[in-house]
Image: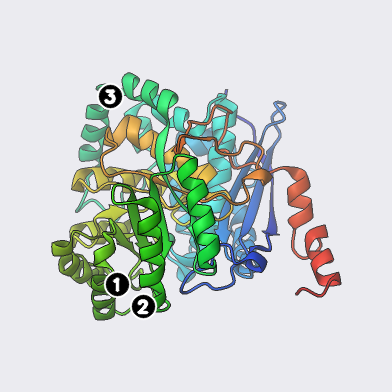
Amino acid sequence: MVGGRIRSLAVRDLRFPTALGGHGSDAMHTDPDYSAAYVTLETDANDGLKGYGLTFTLGKGTEVVVCAVNALAHHVVNKDLAEIVSNFRGFYRQLTSDGQLRWIGPEKGVVHLATAAILNAVWDLWAKQEGKPLWKLLVDMDPKQLLSCIDFRYITDALTEEEAYEILQKGLVGKKEREEQMLKNGYPAYTTSCAWLGYSDQRLKQLCQKALEDGWTRFKVKVGADLQDDMRRCRLLRELIGPENILMLDANQRWDVQEAVEWVSKLAEFKPLWIEEPTSPDDILGHATISKALSPLGIGVATGEQCHNRVIFKQLLQAKALQYLQIDSCRLGSVNENLSVLLMAKKFQIPVCPHAGGVGLCELVQHLIIFDFISVSGSLENRMCEFVDHLHEHFKYPVVIKKASYMPPQDPGYSSEMKEDSVKQHEFPEGEVWQNLMAAQKL
Ligand SMILES: [Mg+2]
């Protein structure tokens, strides 16, 4: 039973010192400390349930996101959960259209990351109150109610609510079998954990061999800092994984458009499936140019992890600027906005391969992509979800990977709740971890 008045919203700045080990390093982000603005919602209901939500940053940025969450909090506190979810489109719009705060967005940047953290907590609370994992809450929801969570403003030229309804209606066929398939086999994943840019060749080799032993067949390598290094690392990885397994490249926005085409052409001999984020995430026409140029080489363009909102995704799709669409559970306006992107991707017949990693991104996005398979796309062709093996131990309901696939979560909620001990230790700057690092003068 959904209910209770939200009586408090708290947000904490959590940071993990990943930069010390070179984890997460790429051509543009050389020293990331994986971090999260972590939101907790409490209600006056006597079920004792709390909602937890987060958004991901690379360290210092969390300070700014925490400010934005606090600035939005008055829209949430004292609201009744049943009222929020019965008019979720209206509530989404209230948050994203705040007359004063939208000026520093709208629906992008820090204020949108903050919106994601808050709404992720709302969805966690809703799913917990319904006693279902989030993916199952979505799968069981009536299509009309699902659509009532989506703000279609600015995308009706690409996807109308009626078209979205038809997609969901068609998705009802075979839904039960697909749910059983997910519960049995899980959703296919790929690993980014072997080949961060800051890892030595020796480390890359060891991690890759271990991943192969564990059954991984799809691998991503960071590129873009130095062409000779990239060629050596790609050659090493391709030799290790053999011709049959899948290799992907990720440049994290390093290049100009023409530079991207020339650089990736030189890596074509290693047969990558895609080049991810070749240039600025805002450059829709640039992505289209790169897509067109690389198409004869059989290399697609993947992007989305820093895509502001559904409007940019709409244009990327309209411009044929990407061949693999990478949603992110913490950058778009939570489940609500991601639903609109999944439905647009279905209409444009572009496979969704979610971005994950960081802090909790794997935990969250698995729900969205499992829902996508069961209720929207109905296909696994050319589809896989990113997996990065960091920081799962801090979550109360960590991801379960079997045979290189995400197994559907069984616990109620959005898998976004962290262990209180971890939260206390990593809170910045008072947490024990940071106090110890500062005492040891490692910072
Ligand atoms: Mg990436």
Judge by depth and name the residue closer to the eye, 404 or 13: 404
Q: Residue at x 67, y 68 (%)?
A: 20
Seen in the image, is 247 located left or right of residue 71?
A: left
Q: Quadrant of the C terminus?
A: bottom right
Q: Is residue 109 left or right of residue 312?
A: right
Q: Nearer the viewer, residue 360 or 296?
A: 296
* Location of residue 67 with respect to 131 vertically, above or below: below
Which mark, by number, is residue 283?
A: 1
Q: Quadrant of ligand 1?
A: bottom left
In primary-sequence order, the first of circles 2 and 3 is: 3
* Mark 2 and mark 1: Cα distance apart in space: 23 Å
Residue 388 can be seen in this image: yes
Q: Residue at x 23, y 71 (%)?
A: 265
Look at the numbered disc 2 and say if its residue's Cβ is closer than 8 Å to ligand 1: no
Labels 2 & 3 near each other (Cβ < 8 A): no
Q: Amino acid at mark 1?
A: Asp
- SS at mark 1 in the image: loop
Asked whether residue 100 appears in the rendered view, the answer is no
Considering only order in the chain, which callout, 1 or 2, is on the residue closer to the N terminus?
A: 2
Amino acid type of the residue tagged 3 in the rendering: Leu
Instruction: Please provide percent x and percent y for residue 231.
Output: 35, 71
Q: Which residue is mark 3?
A: 172
**In the rendering, which numbered label is found on residue 227?**
2
Query: Quick check: 65 above or below 253?
Result: above
* Residue 100 locus on image (x, y percent): 51, 67
| Residue 121 drawn at (x, y percent) | 58, 44
Q: Residue at x 64, y 65 (%)?
A: 21
Measure how far apart labels 2 and 3 are at the Cα level.
Answer: 48 Å
Q: For the residues marked 1 and 3, what is the alpha-carbon distance in whole angstroms?
A: 36 Å
Quarter of the image that includes the N terminus: top right
